[in-house]
Image (cartoon, coloured by chain):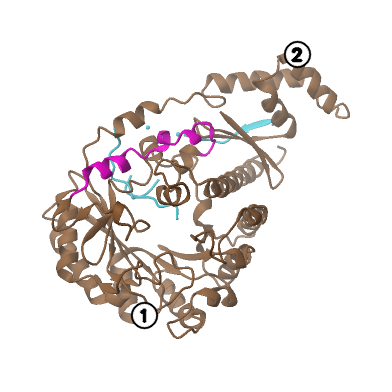
Chain colours: A cyan, B brown
């Protein structure tokens, strides 16, 4: 096909914040 | 905003505001490139002229593609609008909580790596080890400031944390003894150069550490150029067998081999593949953090080679995956079907607000890369946060704080980049480290290419006629 869109899902207010921090230099806690 | 790019023979569109990825043929690629700037009739004319030797490219076919694009646009999967600004505004209203600490249990090291940003482990200060009392106070401080967060993270860092192994063990035991009564769950990690790994360390790490980061730069001659013992001897032969034993005992998971590349090994993919060929599968290789005058610093001249290397790595990873011997590269891990929520994508790593580094004396800094810079001292675990204004400044560091990011396709994948790198490159927390951005965008393109390649393989397997 000329365009094949990959199955993709980019949202509670303010986020729960339980996730792991991510350092540039979905986690299991989500 | 749509980012169109070609990589490893694939034509790809990333819709930056929805995160949707489209695998295209070259005709659709060209049409999408013209879509927003060119009238429909003109697009048909231009495409027919370009592909006049192709029977399959007809006006009707081009109209079909335009109809598909229109449908995807309506669904919010192509040319979608940014609707997340409000997320950033709400972030500043979040109650201030701390959920992660980087414990510098040792400002000392048994290696003397020539490029160490921490000045051979001492952070440009005196050699020092964290006492149990200071570490215990740091853990109590974390619990006191964590609000209703359940998951708390503690990184044992240095210097070389295993030079203070007794305190690492005692602090871990202390945290485990109090976590239930406070309804918390501690997650520990350790970053080590490997010199002091023995059976006791291996047992301890595999019991208590959710992840271990093991520092090695790749090929022996590359590693030993900078990663030397205090006596000037290369460390490769000393650490490699220890890393192998540790990883085998961990069941080959929950670890990272992390290397640093410099201008002396801009062919760093050879180092990654060297480690992969040794049987390690969780790999990361990072550009050196250096001052402009450092002889090993990367410069603009090196960029074309580095970008080529990242493409080469993507190609090789795709090849090895198809051959059934995949490995993971830290920056090429991306989840297109879920991934982190938009709040986390906008907020970034939480440096200086949710995440802090603690020195052996208990001083608080925004993260390990700010340690020792007096202007960034936030307080002390014994006396608390003393510089609330600075903490607020860090809290405001989100992707919308960087004006340069407004037009960037990668912004919801990098969250505005590393604040420490931005500060050290531009002098502003809200600046942008251009060099890092260029590398990050290239990594993102390769990460997406690998996902497209996997998806196409799955489709072709399901329908060989496609």
What residue is drawn where x is 29% and y is 42%?
A17
Q: Are marks 2 and 1 in contact (CB under 8 Å)?
A: no
Which residue appears at 60% of the width and 64% of the height? B263
The quarter of the picture where residue B176 lies is bottom left
Q: Residues within 10 Å of mark 1 (few under 14, many from 20)?
A: some
Q: Going by the picture, which residue comes out furthest to the left? A: B181
> x and y percent of residue B283 in the render?
51, 62
Instruction: Tell which subunit mark 2 falls on.
Output: B
Q: Which mark is residue B41?
A: 2
Q: Is residue B311 above or below residue B199?
A: above
What kind of element bears circle 2? helix
User: Is residue A12 in sight in this rendering?
Assistant: no
- Please, which residue is most extreme toward the right here? B53
In the picture shown, does residue B455 fall above or below B174?
above
Image-based side of B292 in relation to B110, left or right: right
What's drawn in magenta, residue-wise?
Answer: B386-410
- Left or right: B204 with respect to B214? left
Q: Nearer the viewer, residue B254 or B189?
A: B189
Q: Earlier in the sequence, mark 2 or mark 1?
A: 2
- Residue at (67%, 26%) from the top-left corner? B32
The crowd level at tag 2 (other Cα within 10 Å; few <14, some 14-19, many 20+) is few
Q: Is residue B428 left or right of residue B13?
A: left
Residue beneath disc 1:
B196
Could you give the CA–CA distance between mark 2 and mark 1, rounded to whole angstroms? 70 Å
């Amino acid at each position: 096909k000329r365009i094949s869109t990959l199955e993709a899902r980019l949202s509670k207010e303010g986020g729960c914040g339980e996730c792991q921090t991510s350092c540039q230099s979905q986690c299991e806690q989500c | 905003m749509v980012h169109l790019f070609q990589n490893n023979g694939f034509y790809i569109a990333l819709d930056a505001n929805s995160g949707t990825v489209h695998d295209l043929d070259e005709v659709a690629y060209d049409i999408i490139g013209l879509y927003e700037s060119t009238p429909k009739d003109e697009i048909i004319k231009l495409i027919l002229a370009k592909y006049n030797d192709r029977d399959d490219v007809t006006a009707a076919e081009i109209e079909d593609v335009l109809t598909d694009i229109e449908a995807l646009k309506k669904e919010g999967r192509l040319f979608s609008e940014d609707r997340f600004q409000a997320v950033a505004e709400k972030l500043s209203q979040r109650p201030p909580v701390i959920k992660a600490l980087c414990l510098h249990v040792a400002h000392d090291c048994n290696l003397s790596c020539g490029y160490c940003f921490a000045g051979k482990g001492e952070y440009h200060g005196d050699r020092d080890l964290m006492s149990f009392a200071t570490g215990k106070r740091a853990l109590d401080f974390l619990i006191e400031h964590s609000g209703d967060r359940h998951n708390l993270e503690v990184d044992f860092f240095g210097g070389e944390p295993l030079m203070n192994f007794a305190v690492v063990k005692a602090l871990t035991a202390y945290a485990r003894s109090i976590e239930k009564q406070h309804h918390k769950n501690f997650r520990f990690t350790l970053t080590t150069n490997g010199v002091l790994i023995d059976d006791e360390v291996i047992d301890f790490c595999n019991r208590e550490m959710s992840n271990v980061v093991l520092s090695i730069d790749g090929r022996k001659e590359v590693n030993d150029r900078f990663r030397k013992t205090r006596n000037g001897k290369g460390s490769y032969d000393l650490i490699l067998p220890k890393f192998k034993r540790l990883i085998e005992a961990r069941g080959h998971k929950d670890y990272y081999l992390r290397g640093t590349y410099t201008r002396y090994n801009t062919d760093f993919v050879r180092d990654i593949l060297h480690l992969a060929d040794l049987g390690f599968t969780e790999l990361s290789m990072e550009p050196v953090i250096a001052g402009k005058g450092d002889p090993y610093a990367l410069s603009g001249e090196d960029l074309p080679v580095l970008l080529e290397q990242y493409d080469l790595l993507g190609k090789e990873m795709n090849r090895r995956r198809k051959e059934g011997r995949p490995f993971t590269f830290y920056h090429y891990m991306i989840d297109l079907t879920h991934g982190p929520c938009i709040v986390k994508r906008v907020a970034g790593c939480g440096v200086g607000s949710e995440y802090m580094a603690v020195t052996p004396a208990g001083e608080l800094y925004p993260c390990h890369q700010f340690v020792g810079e007096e202007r960034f001292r936030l307080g002390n675990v014994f006396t608390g946060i003393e510089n609330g204004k600075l903490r607020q400044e860090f809290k405001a560091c989100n992707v919308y704080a960087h004006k340069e990011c407004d037009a960037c396709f990668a912004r919801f994948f990098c969250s505005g980049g590393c604040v420490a790198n931005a500060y050290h490159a531009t002098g502003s927390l809200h600046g942008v480290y251009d060099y890092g951005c260029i590398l990050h965008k290239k990594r993102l393109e390769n990460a997406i290419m690998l996902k497209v390649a996997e998806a196409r393989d799955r489709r072709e397997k399901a329908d060989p006629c496609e």
